[in-house]
Image: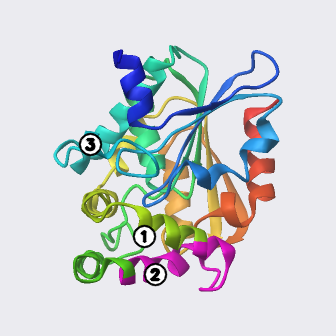
Amino acid sequence: MLQNEKILARNNVKIIDCDGDGPVVLYAHGFGCNQNMWDRVTPAFKSTHKQVLFDYVGSGKSDITAFDAAKYSNLSGYAQDVLDICDALDLKSGVTFVGHSVSCSIGVLASIARPDLFSKLVLLGPNPCFVNHAPEYIGGFEKEDLEGLLALMEQNYIGWANYLAPVVSAKGEESVVTAELSDSFCSTDPTVAKVFARTTFFSDNRTDLSKVNVPCLILQHRTDTLAPLRVGEFVHTEIAGSTLKILDVLGHCAHMAEPQLFIEAMHDFVGA
């Protein structure tokens, strides 16, 4: 198998071609999720954009044998995979990166490494540092609380997944979005999930934000436990020239819970 084919298989890359030669949108899912989380969004851009979806190694239908705990203990490992995917598809410029949650930081790192590759960033629910550093920065969690969450993963992985899903969705245990998240969390290999969780919740990419020099849309949920409103405002302040839009959404997954709001905001920014 050729190297490019290996990369595309490694990350289970899928392409939705538009009717013409449209610009490229690359979607990056959040922790514990997979590319299917964008299913409510992609139909809206099918006629105007070439859409690229993928799974991070260890998520979805990626090649889990490619998982490297050392590489993926840092978000730069995931950012390199994003760049690898673009290179394998021979994408050289004009890519709009759409990232959810931790993928916002991954997209930031990728754009810093290759600013010529990306034309725009759409960051949904970004949180460059989940840990509180009072009083100057409140990321939403005390370090001890996150350590407790990871300890729960070790003790009862399924219980952890069932606990976290309604926290992320903020829709209650019976909602479709909660069930979809729970199923995704539970289907992720526990060994991989533990590494990705620690990398997600203990990375600090605050100082990287000021290095972004491509147009950036920050989509902030109005009420979001995982990325409070003041975090979105912090990201907006740190990324020069960025646009901040508050979505009237409860929870951390507007693209799943209120896809039309997300689509409208994204469409206004990326154009047709």
Position above or below: 26 against 115: below
Amino acid found under the numbered disc labelled 2: Asn
Q: Secondary structure at mark 2?
A: helix
Q: Give the quarter of the image for residue 88.
A: top left
Q: Main secondary structure of the magenta part?
A: helix
Foreground of the two, 77 or 157 = 157
Question: Which residue is painted at 71% across and 26% down in the image?
Answer: 17
Amino acid found under the numbered disc labelled 1: Cys
Position above or below: 4 against 129: above
Q: How far apart, in angstroms, are the residues tagged by discs 2 and 1?
A: 8 Å
Residue found at the far front of this picture: 1
Question: Which residue is painted at 30% across and 69% down in the image?
Answer: 133
Counting residues from the N terminus, which is met first, the one under dot 2 or under dot 1? 2
The verdict on residue 171 being magenta is yes
Name the residue that disc number 1 marks: 186
Crowd rating for badge 2 (residues with CA inside 10 Å; few <14, some 14–19, many 20+): some
Span highlighted in magenta in the image: 159-179
Name the residue that disc number 3 marks: 65
Counting residues from the N terminus, which is met first, the one under dot 1 or under dot 3? 3
Name the residue that disc number 2 marks: 162
Horizontal and vertical percent position of residue 92: 51, 14
Q: Give the quarter of the image for residue 70.
A: top left
Amino acid found under the numbered disc labelled 3: Thr
Horizontal and vertical percent position of residue 235: 50, 52
The verdict on residue 170 being magenta is yes
- Circles 2 and 1: CB atoms closer than 8 Å: yes
In the image, taking residue 60 as reference, residue 73 lies left or right, namely left
Crowd rating for badge 3 (residues with CA inside 10 Å; few <14, some 14–19, many 20+): few
In the image, taking residue 188 as reference, residue 262 lies left or right, namely right
Horizontal and vertical percent position of residue 269: 74, 38
Counting residues from the N terminus, which is met first, the one under dot 3 or under dot 2? 3
